[in-house]
Image (cartoon, rainbow, N blue to C red):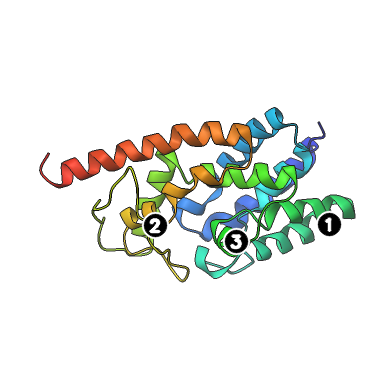
């Protein structure tokens, strides 16, 4: 499997870390690091080109210069940032095209627009990004995002967890409550996995979220 050269990865990490400092805690550099680790874990099993997939993982959520809100840019902006930086770094034109192709579908909003991953590397990167929105980290990130953007309520678990209702997501800002966010996005990610390893990891994280919501409902209503 091809991989990033150590000096290339060091340069990419330094650049991405510096650019992620202005974002909310759920979309900082630790999110990028988790996605990179998941890409390596999934990509090695699935046989992906890790040079392409890891580079895309580092850039998949990169804001354009000056952006301060996760809701003010898209993966199209991130792909543009990746193209500019990787060109300066000496990546081949074909490699940059593959990195762009892996970044563009790597968000839930792009999924809702019908943009699907076509290459194996794109599937691995999207699985990794979606996985970091699930499980214990997904729960923490949901509440961190809500708090950062000033959401005033936690929300209540009012819907059947065995047959959950799909609630509408917000695209201009955070969902009305972090609990709402489970029903607008997080509980549906398991079914969107593109790789065998992604599906295996997603099942574990999905069950953890369901158990959390069950406990939350019990404790909220006097259990």
Image position, residue 30 (x, y; %): 53, 44
Residue wearing tag 2? 166
| Image quadrant in which the N terminus is located | top right
As drawn, which residue projects farthest toward the front?
163
The crowding category of the residue bearing disc 1, from other C-alpha atoms within 10 Å (few below 14, some 14 to 19, many at least 20), is few
Image position, residue 106 (x, y; %): 62, 53
Residue at (34% x, 55% y) in the render: 178
Residue wearing tag 1? 88
Task: Kindly tell me whether residue 136 is visible in this rendering.
Answer: yes
Secondary structure beneath dot 2 equals loop
To which quarter of the image does residue 155 belong? bottom left
Task: Kindly tell me whether residue 69 is visible in this rendering.
Answer: no
Is residue 79 positioned above or below 164 on the image? below
The crowding category of the residue bearing disc 3, from other C-alpha atoms within 10 Å (few below 14, some 14 to 19, many at least 20), is some
Secondary structure beneath dot 3 equals helix
Give the side of residue 102 with respect to residue 217, left or right. Answer: right
Residue wearing tag 3? 110
Residue at (69% x, 54% y) in the render: 103
Residue at (38% x, 45% y) in the render: 140
Q: How far apart are marks 2 and 1 (CA)?
A: 44 Å
Q: How far apart are marks 1 and 3 (CA)?
A: 27 Å
The crowding category of the residue bearing disc 2, from other C-alpha atoms within 10 Å (few below 14, some 14 to 19, many at least 20), is some
Return the disc, 2 or 1, that comes first in the chain's sequence: 1
Give the side of residue 32 with respect to residue 97, left or right. Answer: left
């Amino acid at each position: 499997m091809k991989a990033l050269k150590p000096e290339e990865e060091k340069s990419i990490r330094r650049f991405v870390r510096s650019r992620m400092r202005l974002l909310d805690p759920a979309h900082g550099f630790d999110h990028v690091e988790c996605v990179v680790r998941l890409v390596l874990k999934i990509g090695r099993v699935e046989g992906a080109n890790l040079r392409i997939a890891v580079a895309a993982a580092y850039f998949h959520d990169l804001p354009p210069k000056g952006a301060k809100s996760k809701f003010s840019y898209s993966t199209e902006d991130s792909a543009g940032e990746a193209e500019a930086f990787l060109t300066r770094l000496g990546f081949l034109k074909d490699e940059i095209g593959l990195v762009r192709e892996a970044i563009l579908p790597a968000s839930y909003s792009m999924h809702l627009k019908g943009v699907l991953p076509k290459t194996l590397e794109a599937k691995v990167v999207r699985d990794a990004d979606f996985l970091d929105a699930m499980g214990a980290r997904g729960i923490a990130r949901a509440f961190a995002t809500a708090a950062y953007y000033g959401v005033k309520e936690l929300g209540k678990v009012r819907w059947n967890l065995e047959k959950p209702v799909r609630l509408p997501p917000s695209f201009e800002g955070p969902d009305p409550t972090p609990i709402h966010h489970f029903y607008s996005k997080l509980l549906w990610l398991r079914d969107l996995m593109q790789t065998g390893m992604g599906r295996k990891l997603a099942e574990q994280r999905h069950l953890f979220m369901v158990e959390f919501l069950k406990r939350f409902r019990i404790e909220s209503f006097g259990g």
